[in-house]
Amino acid sequence: MADRELIDYYRARAAEYEQIYYRHVPERRREIDEQAEDLRELVRGKDILDLACGTGYWTQRMARTASFIAAADISAEMLREARKKEYDTPTAFVMADLYSLPFRAASFDMITLGFWFSHQPKQEYDLFFRQLAQPLKDDGLIWMIDNNPLAEGSQLNSVRTDVYGNNYKRRYLQTGEEYVILKNHFSEDQLKEIFAPYFTIRRLVFRTYYWSILLVK
C-alpha cells in the first residue's frame, strides 16, 4: 500500500504537479499528445473509473468522449485541483484509497491509471491487481501510462532499493522541500512479465519517455 511519505509528497505537490505535462521537450510533448488522442478513442461511450486521477489531466481529456467518469484519488489537494477544470461529460470526484474502493463490483467498462504503477510496491502486485479487477465488468479494459527513466530528467536521484527490489528516489518541490518516494522503472519485457499472469495484454506501447498498456480482464 502507498506509504505515508508518498501520499504527503503528492498532497504537497498538487498545485505544481501538472507542470510535468508542459515541459518544453518536443518529442516528450508528442508522446503525451499521441497517448491522449488514443485514450479519447478507447473511452468513447464508456463508463470510466479513473484511479489516482490527480489533478484531472487525463480525466478532462477522457471527458470529451466518455459516457461517465468516476475520478478517485486519496489526496484532497489533488481533487481540489481537479475540480477546478471543466468536463464535457458527467464526472464524479471521490476521495478513496486504491485498496478500499467504494464502487460496486462489475460497474465500469474501463479503468484508467495515470502515472501510478511506478509507485506500486512490487510485493503487493497480486493484491493490487485483484483490487483493479473488482469494479470492472467482464472483459473490461484497464489502461495505464507511466514514464521511462528519460522522463525523469538528468538527475535520477536514486537513494536505495529495498529487499523486494523497489527503488526509492529523492524528489524536491519548488519550495526545496525534500521527499524520498518509491519509484520503479521497467523494461518492455519486464512489463509483459508482470501483467501477463493476471490479464490479457491487448497492446503495449513503449516509447522514449513513456509507456502505456491496455489490458483485458
Image (spheres, rainbow, N blue to C red):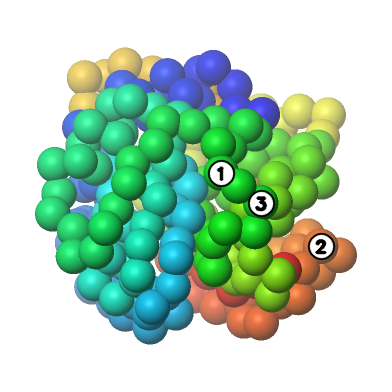
As displayed, is residue 134 above or below residue 173?
below
Q: Which image quarter holds the N terminus?
A: top right
Give left or right: position of 51 versus 11: right
Marks 1 and 2 sit apart, C-alpha to C-alpha, by: 21 Å
Q: Amino acid at mark 2?
A: Tyr
**Badge 2 is on which residue?**
198
Residue 103: which disc?
1
Between 21 and 149, the one nearer to me in the picture: 21
**Could you tell me the amino acid type at mark 1?**
Phe
Work out how far the residue at label 3 is from the one at label 2, CA to CA, in angstroms: 18 Å
Residue 37, picture quadrant? bottom left
For residue 165, say whether it is visible: no
Q: Find residue 150 and report its horizontal and vertical position in percent.
A: 45, 58
Q: Amino acid at mark 3?
A: Ala
Considering only vertical position in the picture, is 42 above or below 19? below
The answer to whether 133 appears left or right of 43 in the picture is right
Contact, mark 1 vs mark 2 (Cβ under 8 Å)? no
The reply to whether callout 3 and callout 1 are in contact (CB within 8 Å) is yes
Q: Earlier in the sequence, mark 1 or mark 2?
A: 1
Mark 3 to mark 1: distance in Å?
7 Å
- At which x and y percent is residue 64? 24, 72
Helix or strand or loop: what does disc 2 sit on? loop
**Can you see residue 66?**
yes
User: Disc 3 designates what residue?
Assistant: 105
